[in-house]
């Protein structure tokens, strides 16, 4: 019997050595090679209380950093929204706003994100049209899996 339901795959976690390498590069003088697309987000674990740093793709929207994730670590930001961002060689303190339930806002942020960073569209399951615009049908499919995070910069 055929079904039209899509199977939700668990998000793939990058290998630790890959995150370690990206973290090293972003903290080094060589950060300029990748810091226009990647940053380091540091947050506090809600259960462990430990500080955790993850490299993430980002886009800047005026004075706000926009992040997207399909991993559950964002729940740590609900418990403690205070984060630090290591962005283009500088460190900023901020308070993260997690947008998980308002899928219309997540959709807007995803569209903005992939228009500014079309190379990341594939990672989010979004197809880009020849015009450079995201295919809205694939955006709508992807939005159900993702959470948007905004961090205003000072």
Image (cartoon, rainbow, N blue to C red):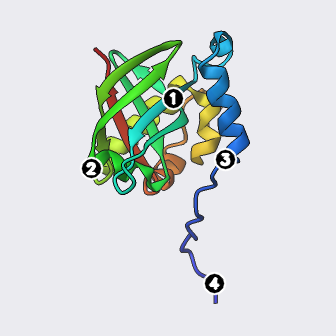
Residue identified by numbered label 4? 2
* Whole-percent x, y for residue 61 in the image: 38, 20
Q: Residue at x 27, y 50 (%)?
A: 79
Q: Is residue 141 above or below residue 29?
A: below
**Label 1 vs label 2: CA separation?**
19 Å
Q: Give the side of residue 115 with respect to residue 1, left or right.
A: left
Foreground tag (3 vs 2): 2
Q: Residue at x 65, y 38 (%)?
A: 19
Q: Earlier in the sequence, mark 3 or mark 1?
A: 3
Number of disc labels: 4
Residue identified by numbered label 2? 79
SS label for mark 2? helix
Given residues 58 and 113, the one toward you in this image is 58
* Whole-percent x, y for residue 136 in the image: 49, 44
Residue identified by numbered label 1? 40
Q: Earlier in the sequence, mark 1 or mark 2?
A: 1
Q: Earlier in the sequence, mark 3 or mark 4?
A: 4
**Does residue 127 show up?**
no
Q: Which mark is residue 14?
A: 3
């Amino acid at each position: 019997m055929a079904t039209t339901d899509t199977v939700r795959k668990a998000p793939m976690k990058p290998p630790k050595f890959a995150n370690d390498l990206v973290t090293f590069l972003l903290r080094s003088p060589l950060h300029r090679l990748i810091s226009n697309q990647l940053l380091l987000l540091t947050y506090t674990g809600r259960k462990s209380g430990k500080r955790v740093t993850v490299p993430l793709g980002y886009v800047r929207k005026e004075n706000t950093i926009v992040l997207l994730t399909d991993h559950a670590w964002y729940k740590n930001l609900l418990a403690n929204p205070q984060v630090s961002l290591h962005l283009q060689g500088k460190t900023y303190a901020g308070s993260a706003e997690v947008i998980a339930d308002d899928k219309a806002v997540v959709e807007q942020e995803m569209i903005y994100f992939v228009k500014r960073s079309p190379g990341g569209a594939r990672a989010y399951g979004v197809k880009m049209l020849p015009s450079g615009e995201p295919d809205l049908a694939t955006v709508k499919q992807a939005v159900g899996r993702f959470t948007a995070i905004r961090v205003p910069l000072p």
